Structure formats: C-alpha cells, structure tokens
Image (spheres, rainbow, N blue to C red):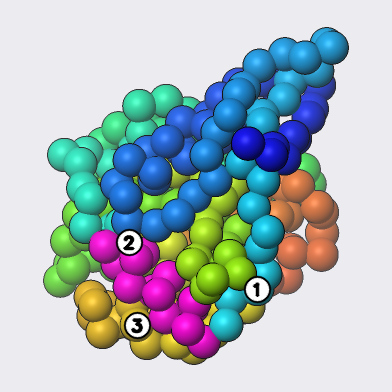
Amino acid sequence: MRVFRKTAPAAELPRFEAEAAGLAALRATACVRVPEVAAVGIVAGQACIDLEHLDLAGLDRHSGAALGRQLAELHRHTSERFGWPSDNWIGGTPQQNDRQREWPLFFARSRLQPQLKRAAGNGMARALVEQGEALAGRLAAFFVDYPPQPSLLHGDLWSGNAAALPDGTPVIFDPAAYYGDREADLAMSELFGGFPESFYAAYRLAWPLDPGYETRKTLYNLYHVLNHYNLFGAGYLNQARRMIEKLLAELRG
C-alpha cells in the first residue's frame, strides 16, 4: 500500500495516536470513506503516522451530496454520553473530552472554557473573557426545546478535511472525533465555506435540522474561532467578539 507520512517532533506522538483512534472509529461505522492507518510510531527520532495514500480532488455536486447522506448516517451512531474515551487535539490545540450526560455542561467545560482560559493567557481583554464565561454559564438556554443526542462526530469538518476520490467517493480525514451534537459538524462545515450546496441539501433530506440550528451554529463556531485566535493571533479577535455579543443578545432576547 502506498502511504502518505506525516511527521512531527517525537513528543507529538500522542496527537498522531489520537488521530489514528478517530479514524478507526469513523472507519468502523462503514458509513464514510476514511484513509486506512498503516502505522503510528517513532521513526528516526520523529513521531509519524502513515496513512493510505489517496488521489483526492475537491468535492463536486455529486460527491458533496453523497457526503451529506453519509454524514447523516454517521451521526446516527450514538453513545450514552457526550465526550470521548480520551482527550485529543483540535488542530494543534489539546481538546478535552471529559464524558458528560448533559451536552450544555460538556460544551461549557470541555470546549468554551478551556479556549477562553487560553485566550486570557494570549492577551484577550478581561472584559471579553468574562463575557465569554457568562455565556458558558448560560448554555442550557439554547437547548430548552432541543435535546441533542451524543452523535459520533468528525469534529473538525472544514473543507480542507474533506475531498473525493476519482470515482466520486467522498473521503474525510484529520478528525478530532468525539460524541456530541450533530449540529456541531454542520456548523464547522459552514464556518470557512467550501462545501457544495448539494452537501447541505442531501444532509437535510436525510435528517432535517432543528430550526434553532441557525442560532446554535454561532455557538459551535465560537469554539473554533477562539481556537484560531489562540493558534494564529489577533486576526480572529473581532470575529470572536461579535459572536459572543450576538449570543449574549440572543439570551437577553
């Protein structure tokens, strides 16, 4: 099998091991194509993960629709609790996955609050961090009429982590897998664009979304925008501020 090797300093081996575990979980559902993991370990003093080499191209209308259907099927694989058996990574950032029965509690403690803590250490104004903390303390208000189930998520579903084989088979990769609200995957796919409209139409046909998604997608994408602020700097500060203010306004309304 031809392989694609990713390497990093040896200390980052746990990140590759977490990636392999996420790919294995997605692969086990037989819902959607993911690269096979050939090996994970230390080679010549470096951490590495060897993945099945695939010839990939961007999603088009047909492969996008297929991925929408397959993602809805993936999300029907559920667990008793939100979270994951171990922590993993979202990009280069550690991602907490403490298991919880209550989704708002999980999202506050394992998603928003760790990012806000990092943001405070990276220079975010104290007043904005406090607004974010106030938001995290009131998340249950967004779920009064919508009780999400713990669905298996890709966890980092932006367009750079989805593609298609030459025969049109969709492929997803580089997961940050956990069990969470399925809306979080859909929200992430919208954050930076790049998915064809057929992807969303096919998903909604297979499993319609609750009307409250249009508000909650801002909440879910706030996590990723905060992460980008912490990874890449102040270019994401104003976007994070607007999202926090919008969500707090929704709560006041």
Q: Main secondary structure of the magenta part?
A: helix
| C-alpha separation, residue under disc 1 versus residue under disc 2 | 23 Å
Q: Is residue 164 above or below residue 3?
A: below
Tell me whether the residue at label 3 lies in contact with that at label 1, contact meaning CB atoms closer than 8 angstroms.
Answer: no
Magenta region: 61-73
Instruction: In this rendered view, identify the residue nearer to me: 196 or 37.
Output: 37
Q: Name the residue under label 3.
A: 202
| C-alpha separation, residue under disc 3 versus residue under disc 2 | 15 Å
Q: Residue 182 carries which label?
A: 2
Amino acid type of disc 1? Answer: Gly
Q: In which quarter of the image is the C terminus?
A: bottom left
Residue that appears at 74% across and 64% down: 236
| C-alpha separation, residue under disc 3 versus residue under disc 1 | 17 Å
Q: Is residue 189 visible?
A: no
Give the percent coordinates (x, y) of residue 54.
64, 52
Residue that appears at 49% across and 67% down: 169
Q: Name the residue under label 1.
A: 58
Residue that appears at 77% across and 43% down: 122
Give the percent coordinates (x, y) of residue 26.
39, 45
Q: Quadrant of residue 138?
A: bottom left
Amino acid type of disc 3? Answer: Ala
**Mark with earlier residue (3, 1):** 1
Instruction: In this rendered view, identify the residue nearer to me: 141 or 93.
Output: 93
Q: Residue 42 carries which label?
A: none
